Image: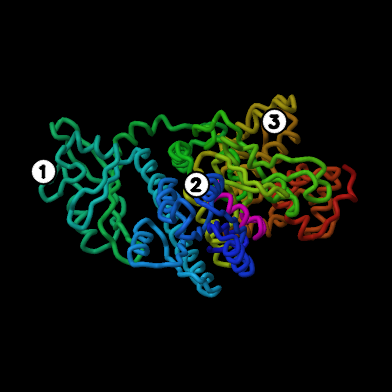
Amino acid sequence: MENISKTDIPILVIDDEESLRHTFKIFLKREGYGPVILASNFEEAVAELTTQSFDLIISDIVLGGSSGIDLLKRIRELNISCPVIMVTGYPTVDTASEALRFGAFDYIQKPVEKEQLLKTTRLALQQYSLQQQKQKAEQEKEKYRSYLDTLFRSVSDSIMTIDENLNIVKMNQSARSLFGAINPAVQEGANLAIACTDPNGCFFKTDAEKVLRSGIEIKEHRVEFSSSDAKTQKVVSLCISPLEDGRGGFHGVVIVIRDMSIVDQSSSKQRSIFHRIIGASAAMQTVYTMIENVGKVDSAVLITGESGTGKELATEALHLESHRQNRPLIKVDCTAIPENLLESELFGHKKGSFTGADQDRMGRILQADGGTLFLDEIGDISSMMQLRLLRFLQEKTFYPVGRDTAIQVDVRIIAATNVNLLEKVHQGKFREDLYFRLRVIDIILPPLRERNGDVLLLANHFLQKYARQMGQPITGISDQAMTLLSTYQWPGNIRELEHVIERSCVLCNGSTIAVEQLPVEVQHQQLYQAKPVLSPMQQKNEFQNQNAPVFSNTGLENSLENRIIAALKKSGGNKAKAARLLSIDRSTLYRKLKELNIDLTTFDL
């Protein structure tokens, strides 16, 4: 069996001759198979088959008052799919034919030679493994198809697929409603050559034929047309893409139609807050819609975005939009937990399983049963944890440390990272199979510099929050200060903006935050804007340069280690406070502490 030790392959041997039963067991055990269970008759065999599962059954054709054929019939009744090898002392064509007709893999003749038994066993197990892999692949395919169907149904855009003969294969509910009003002949199963007698009601047909001929996508363009009663004029956005088969060819096209009149009507009602997420930009409206649609299904989600863009808030919103909203949302920061404790933290452990395990511990996965498990900074887990997590995602079962009994849970997985996981896959630092398991659906959070207009909303929100907390009579921000905040590139995104506003509230002595209360890098941002926009990893490597003003008066050497030590001293060893002083996220600080081998015990907690 693929990736399974022979010692994990249970085999049932049935024969009324005790010596033969034990001989078979010795042959199989010496080859490494096991456990090997013995039964002397039909009744004992059925009892074993109804209490445990086997990967192979080896049975004599003669079983006292019953026969091996009777056993094959019972195996079929019990829906047991493992292969069966029959052993016979007097083979005939009829006996062999009947055995194979009722599902036997093969039969061997007495006296049974060791090599013959082992060869037939090996072939039977290989075929069984292939059958199981095929079945599993079909199940995964069906599950993925179900996910796609759910998403297909839930989106507000009209979507339809057309094959190479212009037959309409699939339409979602939005498409059925749209064409039900403008051209009812356009429906699933119809052919466009017959249904499209009215060009006005088939505004997409010419473009669809063009993509079928060329295989080249036609990107968004807008088309005007009238409703069937000519009373309503509509404008739709049309996008047509080839339906690829994964091998360089395609079998049709996918058409996406967006009613722009609906978009225009709702544009004045754009949301500025969504659960705990604040932002009214077009980029965030897209994120809100994505979260609403994805929240309805149980697919695994990978949230990506630069540090400080709000991945944890997006996770909370996904959980609240799901049917699991009244169940637990368990959060795990994979970089905040030492690597040697992460396995126990996630999967739990049994008392005595390792030094210090003085009681049973329920892991985070079990705590999240029925709800959502959020794995933050997933890109930094070890290869061993990647493998364990992959097995859990595949089976939905896991083994706590030190326990040999599997636990099954119903958990929705949301993972997040600010690194390029696909690049890590190409570098061999992250498993490709785990990457695709986690990224069934991906949500990309835009950086603050791409969220036009959101800086003003967020700055005022944080001002009110910290003015209230500090008891300060601060009511606003000067126009000059707001201009600087709006044009700054925000390499630390929303987290950096929040820290800047908090700092400004501390320094402000009046009712208005002025330019002089802003950090020097915001005041003199031309020094920073001259630099190219960095990737998330580059931002983390360069965070010292970007946050140097925090320690501009300390007199310490301009080194990363000294800056971290200074922050830890100032915070009394509190890592969360130190990270805030440095204007970086905690996971970055944890990683740097580990890389620089800084001993936290030297600081007063």
Q: Residue at x 61, y 48 (%)?
A: 490
Q: Residue at x 16, y 37 (%)?
A: 184
Q: Disc number at residue 345?
A: none
- Nearer the N terminus, badge 3 or badge 1? 1
Per the image, the residue denoted by label 2 is 443
Query: Up-down: is 410 above or below 166?
Result: above
Question: Does any portion of residue 221 appear in the rendered image?
Answer: no
Per the image, the residue denoted by label 1 is 198
Q: What's under tag 2, amino acid-wise?
A: Ile
- The answer to which quarter of the image holds residue 195 is top left
Whether tag 1 and tag 2 are in contact, CB under 8 A, the answer is no
The quadrant of the picture occupied by the C terminus is top right
Q: Disc number at residue 466?
A: 3
Q: What's under tag 1, amino acid-wise?
A: Asp
Q: Which residues are the magenta region?
A: 379-396
Q: Secondary structure at mark 2?
A: strand
- Assess disc 3: are there few (<14), some (14-19) or many (≥20) residues with their C-alpha within 10 Å of its C-alpha: some
- Nearer the N terminus, badge 1 or badge 2? 1
Question: Does any portion of residue 507 appear in the rendered image?
Answer: yes
The x and y percentages for residue 105 are 42, 63
Q: CA distance from mark 1 to mark 2?
A: 40 Å
Q: Secondary structure at mark 3?
A: helix
- The answer to which quarter of the image holds residue 498 is top right
Query: Up-down: is 291 above or below 38?
Result: above
Q: Secondary structure at mark 1?
A: loop
